[in-house]
Image: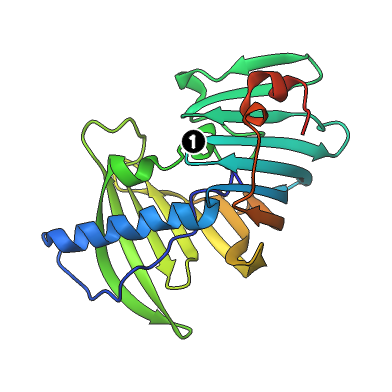
Amino acid sequence: MPIMRRVSLAALLTLLVLSPADGSAQEDARDIISAAVEHWRGTSSRGVFTMTIHRPDWERAMSMRSWTRGEKDSLVRVTEPQRDAGNATLTIDNNMWSFSPKVNRVIKMPSSMMNQSWMGSDFSNNDVTRGDDIIDEYEHTLLETVQQNGHEVYVIESIPREDAAVVWGREVLRIRDDNIVLEHSFYDQDNTLVKSLLSLEIDERGGRTVATRQRMAKTETQDEWTEIYVEEMEFDIELRDSLFTLSNLRNPRE
C-alpha cells in the first residue's frame, strides 16, 4: 500500500555493532533499507486496507484499495463510507494529485502542501509520496543490534544529506530480522521526537510476513492517532499502464 509502502525492511547480513565512522556499517544499513522497499512493494502490489483516524472525542474509519508499481507509482482510492467513496490519491515519481468526486476536480499538490495531513490522518502527503527517497537522500548508520523475542533487531539512524529536500533532522528505525519495522521515529532539526510509526500486529498477507496493523502518533498528542490495518495484499502482479494516470484517477476503470 502507498500509505504503508516504506516500512518493511529486510536484514541481509548478521551484523555486529559498529561505530558510525565505519563505512561498512553505513553500507550495510543502506542495503537493509533498500531491500526493505523491495520486500514490501515487490515489483507491484494490490491491497485492501482500513484507515482509522482517532481523536479524543470522535473516531472514523475508511476502507481503501491500493495499487503500487515499481518505486514511484501508487494509487489509493477510498471505497467506504459512501460519503468518502471515490476520493483518491495518485503518486507518480514524487508528484501527487488528489481527486474528489464531490467537486469532480483533480488537484496537483504543491510543495507548500506536502507537509499537510493526508486525508485528514496523522500521515502527511509527504509520507505518502516519499517512495524510496530515504535510500539515497540519507546517510545510514547501524547503531546496534539487539535481541528481542527471539529475533535480532537492527537499530538504524538515517540522517539526510545536506542537499536533501526533506523536513526531518533524522529518522531512527528498529527493524526485525524477518523484514518487519517495529518502529520508525521522526525527529525535527532540533533533535526533538515529533512522531512515531509503531507496528502493533504482524501476520501473513500475500505469502509474506508483514506488519498488518500500524499506528502513527505525534509525540505531543498521544491520544490522537491513525491506524492502518491491512486486510488483503497481493505482490508481483501484472498491472496495466493506464492504472497510474490522471484519467483513471478521475474515472476509475480498475
Residue sticking out furthest to the left: 21
Position in image of residue 77 (x %, y %): 72, 35
Q: In the shown orientation, is residue 69 left or right of residue 250?
A: left
Name the one closer to the observer, 44 or 131. Answer: 44
Task: Answer above or below: position of 5 versus 91.
Answer: below
Q: Let me know if residue 237 appears in the view.
A: yes
At x 53%, y 60%, the residue is 198
- The quadrant of the image that shows the C terminus is top right
Task: Answer above or below: position of 110 versus 204.
Answer: above
Q: Let me know if residue 222 appears in the view.
A: no
Name the one closer to the observer, 192 or 74. Answer: 74
Residue 18, picture quadrant: bottom left
At x 56%, y 63%, the residue is 199
Residue hosting label 1 = 72
Q: In the shown orientation, is residue 244 left or right of residue 50?
A: left
Position in image of residue 4 (x %, y %): 57, 49
